[in-house]
Image (cartoon, rainbow, N blue to C red):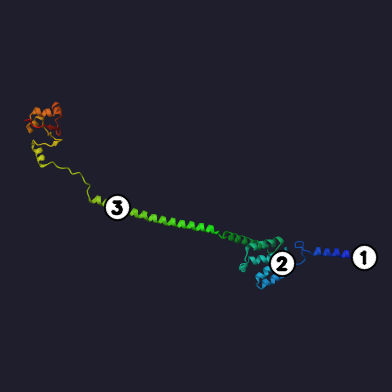
Amino acid sequence: MKFRTGLKQFLAVATFALIAIGCDPATGSNVNHEDDPDFVRGKNRLARKDIAGSILSFEKAIANNPANNLAHFELALIFYSPSSEDHTDYVAACYHFQRHIILNPDSKHADNIAGMIKVCKKEIAKDIAMAPIPLSEINAIHTLRTKLAKADADNANLKTQVEAMRGRLNQRGGEVVTTLASKPVGLPVLQSPSSSQALGSRTGSSSSPAVNGRRIHRLKPKESLYSVSRQYGIPFAQLKAANPRLARNPRDLKPGVTVNIPSKRN
């Protein structure tokens, strides 16, 4: 009886040891990754171009064994490959590539995977840059473009008006110059003295121009108050009385000096 009990204990310990030895410490499973039924099923579906079915199988293999680095690698290739256009997902591809390297640092695909991860990151950056713009911002951009277009049109219209105004000013300026060139500048017309006055001044006539109701005489060369009194038939004393300054200062009797001519006394 004791022998049987001891045998059972031995077998239990041995079984536990075998399980411990056979288990993959990284996966917690003693099943080889390539022999995983879901992994095999995924490979078969992939060979038949059943991309959606193969994705489901590989994801199930990872769900059953998260350390299945081969399933991660196959999913990464599917999501990375441009041939699977409907399933291309660079974010998912980058994730599964990185999980494969973490689970299998010595992977024979390590160098290629490093390059593909860089490509994935670049494509992800493009997607972020091309992210959809909110409707409010689109409306704001449209409004701004409309205002800019209107401002450009207004500027063009204003330039046209300025050019037209400049043309009219140049034309009017030319007309003014032409008018001034064709018409001499008006000069004040000097009225010549009447023929009788001119004749009187030449002949020494007694007639003389009136200034403020008085008659005056402009001295000619060699004339004196006495000769002027004789010319007008006025007593010399009366002429001196009418021009006291000239009578006191004979030196002021020069050509052009005005002499007052009094009326004759009866």
Residue 262 placement, left or right of 11 = left
Q: Amino acid at mark 2?
A: Ala
Residue pushed farthest bottom? 48
Residue 13 placement, left or right of 183 = right
First along the sequence among labels 1 and 2 = 1
| Residue on which the image places disc 3 | 172
Q: At 67% across and 66% down in the image, what residue appears? A: 75
First along the sequence among labels 1 and 3 = 1
| SS for dot 2 | helix
Q: At 47% across and 58% down in the image, what residue appears? A: 146
Is 168 rendered above or below residue 246?
below
Residue pushed farthest right? 1
Q: Amino acid at mark 1?
A: Phe
Image quadrant holding the N terminus, namely bottom right
Is 165 rendered above or below residue 252?
below
Q: Quadrant of residue 104?
A: bottom right
| Mark 1 and mark 3: Cα distance apart in space | 135 Å
First along the sequence among labels 2 and 3 = 2
Residue 189 placement, left or right of 196 = right
Q: Residues within 10 Å of mark 2 (few under 14, many from 20)?
A: many
Q: What percent of the width, then of the height, locates residue 251?
A: 15, 28
Q: Are marks 2 and 3 in contact (CB under 8 Å)?
A: no
Q: Residues within 10 Å of mark 3 (few under 14, many from 20)?
A: few
Label of residue 3 in the image:
1
| Mark 1 and mark 2: Cα distance apart in space | 44 Å
Residue 105: in sight, yes or no?
Answer: no
| SS for dot 1 | helix
| SS for dot 3 | helix
| Residue on which the image places disc 2 | 61
Q: Quadrant of residue 230?
A: top left
Image quadrant holding the C terminus, namely top left
Q: Residues within 10 Å of mark 1 (few under 14, many from 20)?
A: few
